[in-house]
Image (tube, rainbow, N blue to C red):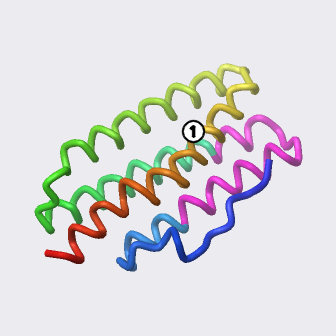
Amino acid sequence: MRPIKWNEKFELGFKKIDDQHKKLVGILNEVIEARNENKQAEIISKTLDELVKYTQYHFSDEEKFMEEHNYPRIDEHKLLHKELINEVEKITRDFNADNIEKVDEVFDLLIHWVLNHILEKDMDYKNFIRNN
């Protein structure tokens, strides 16, 4: 599996949020690299746990940012965040229970999130904030 290459189309123009998105992509790429190099399951598991924790931290910050700017679709966005965290936590638990095939589900889910959530859902609040 190939790592995600950060590029300008992911940028929202809000430094703190963009920096957090870059870090999330970086952690995801660490998981991809560990999987590609057939590193021990405990290394992949540790990196997945880091990814979950950082994602929770980022979502909290992002939601506060949206609240500060009175983003009207914040409840919908929070629900998307909650669903993603629940799914990643479930897959991570399965992986930690020695089901290494589950790591591919994590990749698919997170790559989809990075490519679609940032490019679509996060761009929506970017446009709202920029126009208000």
Q: Residue at x 40, y 72 (%)?
A: 12
In the image, residue 45 lies at what x, y percent? 67, 38
Q: Is residue 55 left or right of residue 95?
A: left
On whether residue 39 falls in the magenta region, the answer is yes
In the rendered image, which residue does mark 1 sit on? 109
Quadrant, the C terminus: bottom left
Q: Main secondary structure of the magenta part?
A: helix
Where residue 112 sits, quadrant-wise, is top right
SS of the residue under disc 1: helix
Q: Is residue 43 left or right of residue 72?
A: right
In the image, residue 53 lies at what x, y percent? 46, 48
In the image, residue 99 lies at what x, y percent? 72, 21
Where residue 29 sits, quadrant-wise, is bottom right
Q: Residue at x 71, y 34 (%)?
A: 104
Q: Is residue 58 left or right of residue 3?
A: left
Residue in the foreground of this view, choosing between 12 and 84: 12
Residue type at numbered disc 1: Leu
Q: Residue at x 62, y 36 (%)?
A: 106
The mark total stands at 1
Q: Residue at x 13, y 55 (%)?
A: 72
- The residues colored magenta run 23-47
Q: Mark 1: give few (<14), some (14-19) or many (20+) Cα within 10 Å.
A: some
Q: Is residue 71 left or right of residue 49?
A: left
Q: Is residue 10 above or below residue 44?
A: below
On whether residue 107 falls in the magenta region, the answer is no
In the image, residue 37 lies at what x, y percent? 88, 48
Residue in the foreground of this view, choosing between 131 and 69: 131
